Image (spheres, helix red, strand yellow):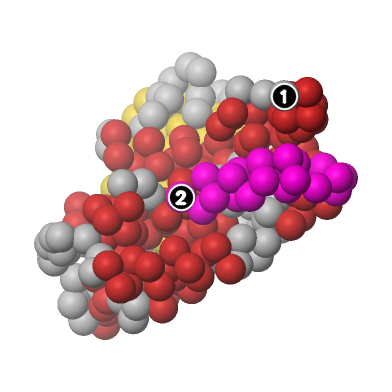
């Protein structure tokens, strides 16, 4: 799976899409497409996952960790290259793939907070070509977010945490099991989080902010929140933003642009897309219906 353009300045190696300027933390997602060729990577502080998007299988030679592999890579095939592992690839034919780079420091923190593993003993194992429906699903959701930018940073951080735990469970030498937390959040803690979200709807709320309120890991917070509220944190946040937008559309004459910013959306179009998804109508149509009713 595929080489990125590290240390290679050819324009064909520039990503088609990149999350580099979207403010995502701990994870970088880029879409690449280029003709037959070769490339090298060597990321010292990031683990690399490549997910094939190729419409037809591509013959690929890979060298990493002192091992060589040659085979056909088709849509959905995945390779994993741990940090500090030199990687070389040569591919025959047009190649198309999604590259996900996740900070090794972030993986270490998740290991410490979620599974009580000593991060100094953490060792992810390389994979040449494998199928993993869980990673493929997360990769495609990140790819969709890269294109649409609808879920926001809380959504991306949630996906990054789930991906990190999955890598630790399935691709580390120790294969530890995360602790099980049952019963959801105590009512007092749940109210504390919901009030925080309500008071900061216009701001860029991070998963880390919510987890820090209760002094727990992001992964465990997400699971306990969903057990308590019945929906993931990013979905709840989005629902509340839409509800506030509905109130402002109905009770004020503020512009839709102003309402978008007051509710935490980054643009008029961002609000419109999400509002239509939740209500079936545009903000303008909703306001008109409220006026006429």
- Between disc 2 and disc 1, the foreground one is 1
Position of 145 with respect to 161 (left or right) is right
Q: Quadrant of the C terminus?
A: top right
Q: Which SS does the magenta portion mostly show?
A: helix
Residue 48, image x, y percentages: 44, 55
Please name whichever residue, 292 or 133, is drawn nearer the observer in this view of the structure.
292
Q: Residues within 10 Å of mark 1 (few under 14, many from 20)?
A: few
The residue drawn where x is 21% and y is 61% is: 184
Badge 1 is on which residue?
Answer: 293
Looking at the image, which residue is at 46% across and 46% down? 235
- Residue 253 painted magenta: yes
- Point out the image quarter for the N terminus: top left
- Report helix, strand or loop for mark 2: helix
> Magenta residues?
236-256
Which disc is residue 236 wearing? 2
Task: Please give left or right for residue 141 compared with residue 275 in the image.
Answer: left
Q: Is residue 8 above or below residue 190?
A: above
Q: Is residue 36 visible?
A: no
Residue 186 in picture, x, y percent from top left: 23, 69
State left or right for residue 105 relative to residue 269.
left
Q: Which residue is rendered at x = 59% and y = 28% of the image?
A: 279
Residue at 40%, 72% (x, y): give it. 192
**Among the 4 quarters of the image, the one containing residue 179:** bottom left
Q: Nearer the viewer, residue 122 or 149?
A: 149
Counting labels gives 2
Q: x, y (%) of residue 14? A: 71, 45
Does residue 179 appear anywhere in the picture? yes
| Residue 198 locus on image (x, y percent) | 55, 63
**Inter-mark Cα distance, 2 to 1:** 28 Å
The answer to which of marks 2 and 1 sits earlier in the sequence is: 2
Q: Residues within 10 Å of mark 2 (few under 14, many from 20)?
A: some
């Amino acid at each position: 799976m595929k080489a990125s353009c590290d240390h290679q300045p050819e324009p064909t190696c520039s990503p088609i899409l990149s999350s580099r300027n979207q403010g995502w933390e701990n994870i970088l997602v880029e879409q690449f497409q280029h003709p037959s060729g070769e490339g090298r990577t060597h990321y010292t502080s990031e683990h690399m996952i490549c997910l094939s998007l190729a419409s037809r299988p591509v013959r690929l030679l890979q060298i990493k960790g002192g091992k060589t592999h040659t085979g056909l890579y088709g849509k959905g095939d995945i390779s994993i290259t741990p940090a500090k592992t030199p990687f070389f690839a040569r591919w025959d034919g047009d190649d198309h793939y999604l590259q996900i780079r996740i900070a090794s420091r972030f993986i270490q923190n998740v290991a410490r907070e979620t599974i009580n593993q000593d991060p100094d003993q953490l060792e992810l194992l390389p994979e040449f070509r494998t199928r993993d429906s869980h990673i493929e699903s997360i990769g495609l959701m990140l790819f969709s977010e890269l294109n649409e930018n609808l879920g926001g940073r809380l959504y991306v951080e949630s996906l990054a945490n789930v991906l990190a735990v999955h890598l630790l469970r399935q691709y580390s030498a120790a294969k530890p099991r995360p602790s099980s937390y049952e019963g959801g959040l105590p009512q007092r803690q749940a109210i504390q989080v919901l009030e925080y979200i309500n008071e900061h709807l216009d701001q860029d709320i991070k998963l880390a902010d919510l987890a820090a309120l209760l002094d727990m890991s992001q992964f465990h917070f997400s699971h306990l929140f969903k057990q308590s509220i019945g929906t993931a944190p990013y979905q709840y946040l989005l629902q509340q933003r839409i509800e506030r937008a509905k109130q402002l559309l109905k009770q004020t004459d503020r512009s839709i642009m102003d309402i978008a910013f007051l509710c935490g959306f980054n643009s008029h179009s961002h609000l419109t897309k999400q509002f239509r998804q939740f209500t079936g109508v545009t903000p303008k149509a909703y306001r008109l219906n409220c006026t006429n009713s």
